Image (cartoon, rainbow, N blue to C red):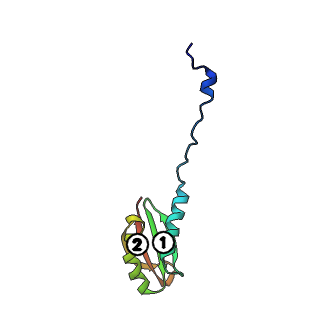
């Protein structure tokens, strides 16, 4: 038997394992980042239909132009394919949507 006995092996400390970030935590960060830069009364949401979509609903048409400019620059370019349309069931809102990549 070598000089390293089983008692020496038992003394080795293991580094704590790092848990990967939860998807919900990552999505919360995305929502927070967008809300920080969007108008205060904007409604920000995310949905998934095989692709991850960001939706920002605003009342003012001028806010749409601002969102179209800053979304592609936000988050190191995670938002792309920006589209503007109407907001379902809210006729006085405008919706700015984007695909979200990691």
- Residue 8 falls in which quadrant of the image? top right
Q: Left or right: 41 with respect to 76?
A: right
- Locate residue 68, reporting x and y percent: 38, 77
What residue is shown at x 46% (from left), y 87% (from top)? 60
Marks 2/1 in contact by CB < 8 Å: the verdict is yes
Identify the residue shown where x is 42% and y is 66%: 75
Image quadrant occupied by the N terminus: top right
Q: Where is residue 78 drawn, in percent x and y?
A: 40, 64
Please rate how many residues cluster around mark 1, counting C-alpha atoms within 10 Å: few if below 14, some from 14 to 19, many from 20.
many
Which of disc 1 and disc 2 is earlier in sequence? Answer: 1
Q: How many marks?
A: 2
Q: Position of residue 12 (x, y in %)?
A: 59, 31
Distance, label 2 to label 1, CA atoms, is: 8 Å
Residue found at x 60% / y 19%: 5
Q: Which residue lies most toward the top here?
A: 1
Residue 47 sits above or below residue 6 on the image: below
Q: Whole-percent x and y of residue 96?
A: 42, 76
- Which residue is disc 2 drawn over? 71
Residue 34 - label: 1
Local secondary structure at mark 2: helix
Q: Nearer the viewer, residue 56 or 40?
A: 40
């Amino acid at each position: 038997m070598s000089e390293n006995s089983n008692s020496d092996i038992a003394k080795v400390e293991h580094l704590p394992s790092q848990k990967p970030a939860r998807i919900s935590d990552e999505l919360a960060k995305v929502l927070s980042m967008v809300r920080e830069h969007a108008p205060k009364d904007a409604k920000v949401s995310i949905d998934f239909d095989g692709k991850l979509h960001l939706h920002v609903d605003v009342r003012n048409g001028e806010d749409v132009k601002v969102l179209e400019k800053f979304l592609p620059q936000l988050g190191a370019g995670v938002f792309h394919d920006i589209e503007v349309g109407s907001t379902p069931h809210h006729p006085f809102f405008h919706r700015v949507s984007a695909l979200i990549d990691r």
